[in-house]
Image (cartoon, rainbow, N blue to C red):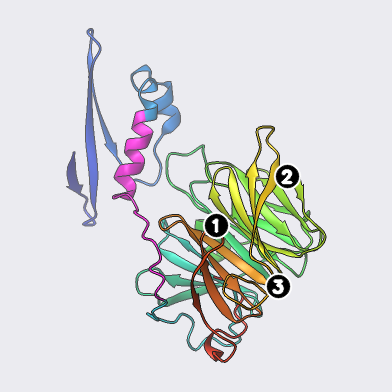
Amino acid sequence: MFSTTNAQGTTSNQVLLFRNDCSKTKILLFDFYQEKLDLKMMMSDPFCNSDMNLFSKLTIKMRWGKKRYTKGFSGKFEHVGTLGKGIMSMVPMDVKISYHHNCILVANFHNACIHVFELKSKQLKYSVSTPARFPTSICIEENYNDNVNIMMDAILMFCHQNHCLYKYDLEKYLLKDNRGLAIWKSTDIARTMSVTMRPNSKQIFCVDMDARSVKILDSRSGITIHCISLEQSSSPFSLAFVNDFQFVLSTDINLKIFKMSVSHEWKCVKTLGKKGDNRGEFDCAQSIIFDKKSQFLIVNDRTNFRIQIVTLEGECLASFGSFSMIMIDGRSGI
């Protein structure tokens, strides 16, 4: 591998690939930082065809550099910064990170927009209007396009005004000229505050609060492919995946662990906590995330004005916040 610099002063990494096929030797030069590679030409070349899988992985590695290593939450609740100071009518409903685009995305319910913050500096870059008012949930689908050889993120967002779930190419959505070009949209969900990608799949899990169900959509088409009916005795809010075959559902009174059975049905196998204000109890667990590094749940216990850290066995390891803490009064997402 070597670097070259063009007339504009731009440096790019390039690589030479050698192969000896007895009768001839080929030398190919690839620029891993150009916007598009002519994959059709490469696939039609018998020299490249047999090695495309390895080449694809090498291309991604060269383009995106070092592997991203996750770091678990310390559980200390140390205040290290604030986003959105000075933004009028800031009512954040959800927040997600796109590492490929180096940005933090915040859904502003009242202003009908997505605020885009620079990932490292945490400074506001700009805001992009949502296709309808009252965005309640956003989700990032990483590497959504299997037909191209580069990492591309998609953004999923639900707007309460028209009860519609939208999917956009994130890069195009962040360009104001292209934000109207949705890949697809679905009106099969009445109301949700939780849109989540199932790991290692093309499935979107949406908690439909009004229908008391979890609807599973094909992320490529937006078509609903399955529906998990929930108990009518509690109101579902959010879910977080523990792994490919297990997720935790938060409700107004407790947490429920679901696992996929041998027959590929999702079944509730355990209930954590109950309604109350003691440690390990919940009163409207509105949102939840699973810290894969530390293997515990971080729960937004909304009506109790606190965040709880809970194990998969239901033990409360830490609690942060109280009714008197104005700084987290009325929060909606974590």
Q: Earlier in the sequence, mark 1 or mark 3?
A: 3
Q: Residue at x 74, y 43 (%)?
A: 226
- Which dot, 2 or 3, sits closer to the camera? 2
Q: Amino acid at mark 3?
A: Arg
Q: Is residue 176 left or right of residue 233?
A: left
Q: Secondary structure at mark 1?
A: loop
Q: Residue at x 62, y 83 (%)?
A: 330
Q: Secondary structure at mark 3?
A: loop
Q: Residue at x 18, y 46 (%)?
A: 4
Residue 37 pos. (x, y %):
39, 38
Whether pointer 1 and pointer 3 mark residues with C-beta atoms closer than 8 Å, the reply is: no
Question: Residue at label 2?
Answer: 223
Q: Residue at x 68, y 72 (%)?
A: 284
Dividing the picture into quadrants, the one containing residue 293 is bottom left
Whether pointer 2 and pointer 3 mark residues with C-beta atoms closer than 8 Å, the reply is: no
Q: Amino acid at mark 2?
A: Ile
Looking at the rendering, the stretch of residues picked out in magenta corresponds to 54-76
Location of the C terminus by quadrant is: bottom right
Q: Amino acid at mark 1?
A: Glu
Question: Residue at label 1?
Answer: 313
